[in-house]
Amino acid sequence: MTAADAQRPLHREVRGGRARFPWSRLLSPPLISLAGLIALWWVSSLAQPRHILPTPFDVLGEIWRITIVTGELWAALQISLVSLLIGGGLALVIGVTLGVLMGAQRTVEHALDMYVIGLYVAPVSALTPLFIFWLGIDLAPRVATVFVFAVPQVIITCFRGARSTPRTHIQVARAFRASNREIFTKVIVPHEIPYIVTALRLGLGQAIKGMVLAELLVSTTGLGLLLNTYSQLFDTAALIAVVLILMFIGVIGTALVARIETAITPWRKSP
Amino acid sequence: MRTRIISLVVLITAWWAGSAVAGDLVLPSPATTLGRFIDLMVEGRLSLALGIGLNALAVGGGMAVLVGVPLGILLGVRRRLGSAFDFYFSALYVTPFSAVAPLFVLWFGIDAGSRMIFIFFFTLPQIVIVCYQGARSTPEGLIEVARSFQARPRDVFFKTILPFEVPFIFTALRLGVGRAVQGMVIAELLISATQGLGFLITVYSATLDIGAVLAVILFIMMLGIVASMLVQRIEDAIAPWRHGVTTSGEASGA
């Protein structure tokens, strides 16, 4: 935090009057569009039965019910978050290592790039039935799904970071007789750090998606069971409530990591 | 290239050894998988399922491109619109969209139309976001130079922002193809369950025909990879200066 504070005066000087958060200018268009969207939803829900399209107030009531009154969401979320943490953590550790190695070493890159790109573009959700067959219907297949969802993203982001190290920086280091190891630890790795945070942000999004997909396909506990129960009961309002809360968690989670990202690399801040 | 061949040989050997240890029922050997793949091809089940999937993919993904590219550019050029609406696309993008599948079943049923709509909404945010970022990241300096040469806003758009945007559109296409294939599989696993590739996976894993499951999964993965590589080729041909920026660019260049 202190590093960010130290940056701030310079920041204010450079960006002039924009240092204070321009609430009136930035916040009003999203607010207007949000109000418009909710109004549209409300109006169109009036003509539909509740089990097809509930009103925003129905959904608000359901959010209140599942979070405060019965608290069933938290119980379900807790179970799901375990798979997110284990799978996501594994993906981060393994992904950063492999990504940096691939960026720094052509041999490693050529040995692995096919599979990483393959996993990245391939529909990994197809693997979940296989995980269920191999690993049962407990925690393991969900962890595996989260892992394969997140790890290609992490590897590719870290790979790009390591590869995008400016050639001139490496040449200067070489000219000063830096060894290969020094080039790796003192040029490539420092250049890599913001990319690791980016990888964390993108990987987190992927991990949450993997978690929800695994929940829906395994659906013996946690959020999957909750969503399945609601859809079988035609409780659309509760279904939308859970979806909105999951969206919210995804947005807040990535926004938090994005905050860290800008704190670490203020020069990359977008206008 | 040699390293790639060695790593492939190592992988297949490991697969073979693993299936020898675990047994053909749990982990079918490469030969069994290949055999089941040929069976499925000869029976025509795979191509039938593929046809159904690709149809939904083409319609849903195509609509996402047609809507997403102009929308992304519009949001990027009109800052006020962008700040009003970019939030929804980044929210949709980070959202675990498969959670919406039960809702889609309620709203649109379980037929191909429902899957098309799913694929559309699944692919759209990816395309909008990349095009949006492209239009926004046009260097301010270029725009200022154009302005100082008395370019009208229309000229700035067509002669500065749009040319800068082209490689981003292809990136959006490439990422969009991958995402649409993913959306297709998720849609088939969660929405239809009566036909298509996802259905084949469900059926064969229920009947413990893991060789067939592996064959279908590997086939789908190959499909996604080949599609992305094709778009990458086009991207390289159109915007060669960006070559080498991405991983797959490295792959196709080596």
Image (cartoon, coloured by chain):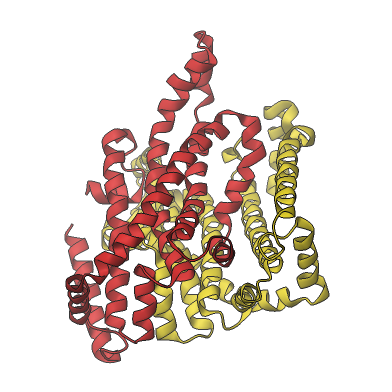
Chain for colour red: B
Tell me the residue at 17%/78% (across/down): B35
* Position above or below: A44 against A209: above
Name the side, left or right, on which B201 lies relative to B75.
left
Q: Visible in this render: residue A108?
A: no
Tell me the residue at 52%/37% (across/down): B72
Tell me the residue at 48%/38% (across/down): B131
Name the side, left or right, on which B204 lies relative to A10.
left
Q: Relative to the observer, which residue lies in front, B224 or A166?
A: B224
Q: Can you give x and y, in whole percent of width and height, for residue A41 in the image?
A: 70, 50
Tell me the residue at 49%/41% (across/down): B68
Q: Can you give x and y, in whole percent of width and height, for residue B151 in the image?
A: 50, 11
Q: How many marks?
A: 0
Which quarter of the figure has residue A234?
bottom right
Q: Can you give x and y, in whole percent of width and height, for residue B246 in the image?
A: 36, 47
Name the side, left or right, on which B120 lies relative to A103.
right
Specify the quadrant that holds the N terminus of chain B. Answer: bottom left
* Position above or below: B226 against B102: above
Q: Relative to the observer, which residue lies in front, B174 or B247?
A: B174
Which quarter of the figure has residue A270?
top right
Q: Colour of chain A?
A: yellow
Name the side, left or right, on which B205 lies relative to A75.
left
Q: Visible in this render: residue A262?
A: yes
Which quarter of the figure has residue A26?
top right
Residue placed farthest to the top in the image?
A: B150
Residue placed farthest to the right in the image?
A: A69
